[in-house]
Image: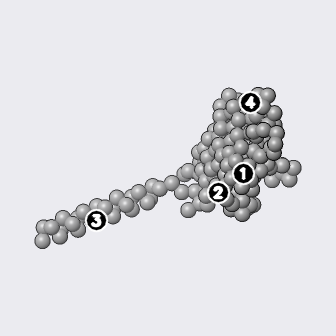
Amino acid sequence: MRIRITLFVGLIAVMALGLSSIGTAASGFKVTGGGQTDVGDSGAGDTIAFVAMEKGEGVHGQVQYIDREGGTGKGQTVFHGTVTCLTAVDAGEQGAAYLAGTWRDGGTFEIYAEDNGEPNQGSDLIYVDQGATPNCEDDDDDDEPTALGRGNVQIHSAE
């Protein structure tokens, strides 16, 4: 009888712990990605890595961007940034997103990322606008996204 009660109390404790972790699990829209822009035969393109997610009432995320001056190999500048806004966009096979924020050393950025399926196929798209006023509602038709030739964009829907 004592064994049954002990097992029953233990089962209740495990269930309570499981339910409490479900209540605190992070949920919301999330976008991750990284790789190099596709510049054809002219060398390595710009490199980017990013993660941005809705968390509670805000947005959390980081970006690392290496500007290789159009793949010329004549120099590069590394930028580290914090994401301050994130918006889901109805585009691409798996979705798309605008994320924007500020660079650690000053300045601002806006990024458009589009998930078009399998990684490393050159079908995911990326556009980085340095110096843009952070605006996650950007719907400019003049943005020219570039294929992400070596990498992947992943759009994760809100739970």
Q: Which residue is mark 4?
A: 76
Q: CA distance from mark 4 to mark 3?
A: 58 Å
Say which residue appears at 68% left-offset and 53% top-offset: 120
Look at label 2 and name its amino acid. Answer: Ile
- How far apart marks 3 and 1 lie (CA) works out to 45 Å
Is 146 left or right of 16, judged from the image as shown? right
Residue at the extreme right: 142
Q: Which mark is residue 113?
A: 1
Classify residue 120 as left or right of residue 18: right
- Rounded to the nearest angstrom, the CA distance separating label 2 from label 3 is 37 Å
Q: Residues within 10 Å of mark 4 (few under 14, many from 20)?
A: some
Q: Which residue was labeled with disc 2?
A: 155
Between discs 1 and 2, the one toward the N terminus: 1
Single out the mark in the foreground, 2 or 3: 2
- Compute the Cα span from label 4 to label 2: 28 Å
Q: Earlier in the sequence, mark 4 or mark 3?
A: 3
What x and y, as percent, mark residue 55? 56, 50
